[in-house]
């Protein structure tokens, strides 16, 4: 066991006294587990339990924890420099990563803007769209999106999150008011029905002269409900936005790097966005990094216009440590045959989660790529469920009605079976058979 300065109880006590956790009350008594290390698909708790990781630390640790080659990428770069400003300087880690991103992303995307988190990548994308129109002498400020989306927690990003689950009521009057249409009802494997596009089409047409861009999560709406929608919807969005010259922003922060079975979720619909946001999956869970890619047309229009420059520049832009590890992560995807890894996970999740359909309280079970979802009839009690999962040696973090898993690509069948069996047992124990 690694040596720590604090006992387990001291850690928890001091944490509760001083630290905020995501989306929580400072006074909450949600279960809290101290982690000492993590390796491959396993997380080691200070109390001794070793948990199979079903969450990839919120989509990010694609190749598992403490990966020798990813560690090496950071270590090698650390010996050269941890960071250097990006104003006036460039460096190989940034250039190499940008080239890889341009090579693997839709052909149209040629320009890369690095930033430090997903929310900021979304802010950057939205600023690009606004400046794109300003450069053409147009003041377009509205963004059209679909309900139940999630794009981050900063103000512009929040403004395009679902108005209900995104807590717009807490910031009324502060948030920009955007245009929303219902979430597509046709699901990924459903037959397409043209009706499903009516609301989007009419809203778009009614407001198109004010719309700076359409922004959405392609195919998989993650935090807004783990909804997998029809590629035809996305195709139609692309056709309509293209017809009117309105940029399409694809937020691939959760879905990028193969998570849905394609390198980018847009590929399920064969569409190319004008702007694409990457984050979470980009740097393999090592160091926070995000990127906003755009087409030559967007970039040159912004820069030929009256502003002439794009107005954003984070202090830690293109951090060399983060770029090095992201670059190695992309190389590993190919070395490991990510497509086969994700295909296997999809098959294992399909067979492993299918028995849950028989359980009481389960509304739906669905799988796409390396994403497995058990949707319940009503919101689950995290406080009750999380310790039950930990007792069974698995790490899952349900939210709302959703018990879901997004395991690292290096996970094996036995580990997936344990994750799925754990979910089955805990639901069965809590709700009973139908
Ligand atoms: C997580 C997420 C974000 C925000 O990324 P952060 O790094 O948490 O700021 C934006 N969009 C999508 C689709 C996400 O899943």
Image (cartoon, rainbow, N blue to C red):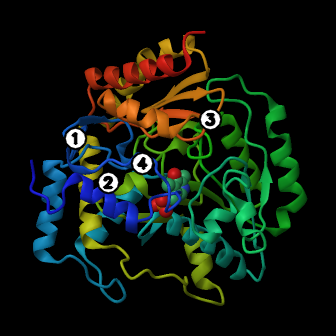
Marks 1/2: CA distance?
18 Å
Marks 2/3: CA distance?
28 Å
Label pair 2/3, CB-CB below 8 angstroms: no
First in sequence, mark 4 or 3: give its number: 4
Q: Secondary structure at mark 3?
A: loop
Q: Which residue is mark 2?
A: 285
In which image quadrant can residue 244 be found?
A: bottom right
Q: Secondary structure at mark 4?
A: helix
Q: Which mark is residue 233?
A: none
Eye-nearest disc, 1 or 2? 2
Q: Which residue is mark 1?
A: 335
Q: Which residue is mark 3?
A: 379
First in sequence, mark 2 or 3: give its number: 2
Circle 2 crowding by C-alpha within 10 Å: few under 14, some 14–19, many from 20: many
Q: Secondary structure at mark 1?
A: helix
Circle 4 crowding by C-alpha within 10 Å: few under 14, some 14–19, many from 20: some
Eye-nearest disc, 1 or 3? 3
Marks 4/3: CA distance?
20 Å
Circle 1 crowding by C-alpha within 10 Å: few under 14, some 14–19, many from 20: few
First in sequence, mark 4 or 2: give its number: 4
Q: Which residue is mark 4?
A: 58
């Amino acid at each position: 066991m690694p040596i720590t300065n604090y006992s387990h109880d001291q850690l928890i006590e001091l944490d509760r006294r001083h630290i905020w956790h995501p989306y929580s009350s400072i006074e909450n008594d949600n279960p809290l587990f101290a982690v000492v290390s993590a390796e491959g698909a396993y997380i080691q708790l200070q109390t001794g339990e070793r948990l199979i990781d079903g969450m990839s630390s919120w989509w990010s640790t694609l190749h598992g924890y403490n990966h020798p080659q990813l560690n090496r990428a950071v270590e090698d770069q650390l010996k050269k420099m941890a960071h250097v400003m990006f104003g006036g300087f460039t460096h190989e880690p940034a250039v190499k990563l940008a080239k890889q991103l341009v090579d693997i992303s839709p052909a149209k995307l040629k320009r890369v803007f690095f930033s430090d988190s997903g929310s900021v990548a979304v802010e950057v994308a939205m600023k690009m769209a606004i400046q794109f129109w300003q450069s053409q002498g147009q003041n377009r400020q509205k963004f059209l999106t679909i309900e139940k989306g999630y794009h981050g927690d900063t103000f512009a990003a929040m403004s395009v999150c679902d108005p209900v689950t995104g807590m717009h009521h807490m910031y009324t009057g502060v948030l920009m008011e955007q245009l929303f249409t219902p979430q597509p009802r046709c699901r990924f494997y459903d037959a397409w029905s043209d009706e499903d596009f009516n609301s989007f089409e009419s809203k778009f047409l009614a407001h198109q002269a004010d719309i700076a861009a359409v922004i959405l999560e392609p195919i998989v709406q993650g935090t807004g409900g783990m909804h997998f929608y029809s590629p035809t919807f996305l195709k139609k969005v692309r056709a309509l936005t293209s017809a009117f010259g309105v940029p399409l922003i694809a937020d691939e922060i959760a879905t990028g790097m193969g998570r849905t079975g394609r390198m980018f979720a847009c590929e399920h619909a064969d569409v190319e966005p004008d702007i694409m946001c990457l984050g979470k999956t980009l740097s393999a869970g090592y160091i926070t990094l995000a990127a906003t890619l755009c087409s030559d047309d967007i970039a040159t229009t912004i820069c030929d216009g009256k502003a002439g420059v794009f107005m954003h520049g984070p202090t830690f832009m293109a951090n060399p440590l983060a770029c090095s590890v992201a670059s190695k992560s992309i190389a590993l995807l190919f070395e490991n045959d990510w497509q086969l890894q994700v295909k296997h996970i999809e098959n294992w999740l399909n067979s492993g989660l299918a028995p849950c359909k028989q359980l009481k309280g389960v509304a739906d079970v669905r799988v796409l790529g390396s994403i497995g979802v058990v949707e319940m009839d009503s919101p689950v009690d995290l406080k009750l469920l999380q310790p039950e999962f930990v007792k069974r040696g698995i790490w899952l973090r349900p939210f709302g009605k959703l018990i879901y898993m997004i395991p690292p690509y290096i996970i094996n069948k036995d580990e997936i079976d344990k994750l799925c069996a754990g979910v089955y047992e805990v639901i069965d124990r809590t709700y009973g058979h139908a």
